[in-house]
Image: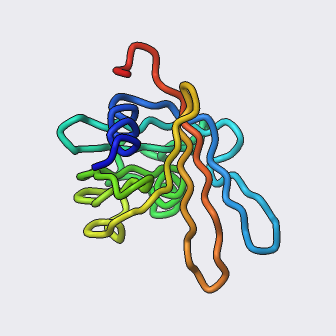
Amino acid sequence: MNDAEKALRQGLIGAWLLESWEVEYGDGRITQPFGADAHGLIIYAADGWMSATMSASARTSLDAATPAASSLESRAAVFAEYLAYGGRWSLQGETIVHRVTHSVNPVLIGTSQRRDASLVGDALLLQAVEPLPRPRTHRIRWRRASGSAK
């Protein structure tokens, strides 16, 4: 591990609050999957574990007291407005690799989610290209949570 990678690793440790998540499509269109005021938290622990959550700020409520008693439509809406996963993290140069061990979306379990990373002051910028039939680029900006390790 070179000095730049060591500095990035040390700088990542701690908790980060979501500032924005944008997706840019090949045609130039930009969307915000959970809206302009989305919420989120990502935590990088020094021992190599990580956890991330993101959601729309005005989330749909279930239509009953418990998920089991709620309608399929209500549960689908709640699921569509929330993302959570965790697992092990490592660096490969300036790329963070999240090796997903648990997720609200089972499709992610066992995958390696790669994010190009840069630290600018108290901001963490993550970027990933998703190679769909038509590629799209995710840009996620996090701000160091107050009181978090530096």
Q: Position of residue 50 (x, y in %)?
A: 29, 44
Vertical placement of residue 131 versus 81, above or below: below
Q: Is residue 136 left or right of residue 52?
A: right
**Front in this rendered view, residue 76 or 51:** 51
Q: Residue furthest left?
A: 47
Q: Residue furthest top?
A: 147
Which one is in front, 122 or 2? 2
Place of residue 26 in the rendered image (x, y in percent of width and height, measured from the top left): 75, 74
Q: Quadrant of residue 8?
A: top left
Splitting the image into 4 quarters, where does residue 47 fall? top left
Instruction: Say left or right for 21 vs 69.
Output: right
Q: For the point 56% across and 43% down, which residue is it?
A: 125
Query: What is the total number of numbered labels drawn onto the structure image?
Result: 0
Q: Nearer the viewer, residue 1 or 103?
A: 1
Its colouring scheme is rainbow
Residue shown at the point (26%, 35%) measured from the top left:
45
The residue positioned farthest toward the bottom in the image shown: 133
Q: Look at the picture and state if 85 lies above or below 113.
A: above
At x 39% / y 49%, what residue is drawn? 84
Residue 23, image x, y percentages: 67, 59
Where does the image place residue 77, in percent across and percent down from the top left?
A: 54, 56
Give the residue displayed 82% in from the left and 67% down from the top: 28
- Quadrant containing the C terminus in the rendered view: top left
Judged from this view, the residue extending furthest toward the right is 28
| 123, above or below 52, in the image | above
